[in-house]
Image (tube, grey):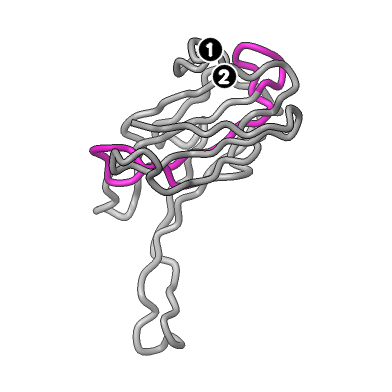
């Protein structure tokens, strides 16, 4: 299965060395954590959260993208990427405000001819990119470990 941890840091203060930081709080995002994320097609071998990237979504306090390389939503081990909009962590604990799933069956990828197929393990390597199309939002590159290709996604 897998999990993603959001760790909140604070300045180490006078006792810190240079610009060091120290642990303040954390939030665990998993299907059992209660933080607001549930996978669409859970299996014991999804490999969620092995790689994570910041995602630039309009109107969010923060957003992340992480892959589930062995997700079976649409095809065995085709893979998926979850894009999560996070709440502002004023309490020191983040929650998931909204979830977008990009997979063979969700997120409009099939309509664009980008649907991963069985064994691609799409989402093995998500990476944040700068704004390439001038809309003020960053883009997302998503790689595979079985299909040997990378998709460039323009998020909105």
Label 2 CA crowd tier, 10 Å (few <14, some 14–19, many 20+): few
Most common secondary structure along the magenta stretch: loop
User: Residue 46 location in percent, x, y?
Assistant: 66, 29
Does residue 49 appear left or right of residue 21 in this picture? right
Query: Which segment did they paint magenta?
Result: 53-78
Outermost residue on the front side: it is 133
- Please tell me which residue lies in front, 65 or 142: 142
* Residue 15 figure quarter: bottom left
Q: In which quarter of the image is residue 145?
A: top right
- Element type at mark 1: helix
- Give the side of residue 54 with respect to residue 80, left or right: left
Q: Name the residue under label 1.
A: 110
Image quadrant in which you'd find residue 118: top right
Which quadrant does the N terminus fall into? top right
> Foreground residue, 112 or 79?
112
Distance of mark 2 from mark 1, alpha carbons? 6 Å
Give the residue displayed 39% in from the left and 32% down from the top.
155
Does 72 sit left or right of 60 as displayed?
Answer: right
Q: What element carries label 2?
A: loop
Residue 50 sits inside the magenta stretch:
no
The answer to whether the residues at label 2 and label 1 have Cβ atoms under 8 Å apart is yes
Q: In this view, does 91 lie above or below 87?
A: below
Give the percent coordinates (x, y) of residue 71: 64, 23
- Out of 80 and 97, give the one closest to the viewer: 80
Residue at x 33% of width, y 42% of height: 137
Q: From this view, report whether residue 101 is shown above or below residue 89.
A: above
- Indicate the quadrant containing the C terminus: top left, top right, bottom left or bottom right: top left
Residue in view at x 35 percent, y 89 percent: 14
Where is residue 22 drawn, in percent x and y?
44, 72
List the residue tagged with mark 2: 114
In the rendered view, would you say 102 is above or below 56? Answer: above
Q: Is residue 68 magenta?
A: yes
């Amino acid at each position: 299965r897998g999990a993603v941890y959001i760790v909140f840091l604070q300045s180490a203060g006078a006792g810190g060395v240079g610009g060091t930081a120290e642990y303040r709080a954390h939030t665990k995002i998993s299907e059992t954590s209660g933080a607001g994320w549930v996978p669409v097609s859970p299996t014991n071998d999804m490999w969620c959260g092995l790689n994570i990237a910041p995602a630039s979504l309009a109107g969010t306090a923060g957003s992340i993208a992480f892959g589930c390389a062995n997700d079976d939503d649409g095809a065995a081990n085709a893979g998926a990427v979850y894009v999560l909009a996070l709440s502002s962590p004023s309490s020191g604990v983040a929650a998931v405000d909204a979830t977008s799933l990009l997979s063979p069956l969700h997120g409009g990828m099939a309509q664009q001819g980008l649907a991963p197929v069985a064994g691609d393990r799409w989402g093995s390597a998500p990476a944040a990119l700068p704004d390439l199309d001038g809309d003020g939002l960053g883009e997302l590159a998503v790689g595979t470990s079985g299909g040997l290709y990378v998709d460039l996604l323009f998020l909105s």
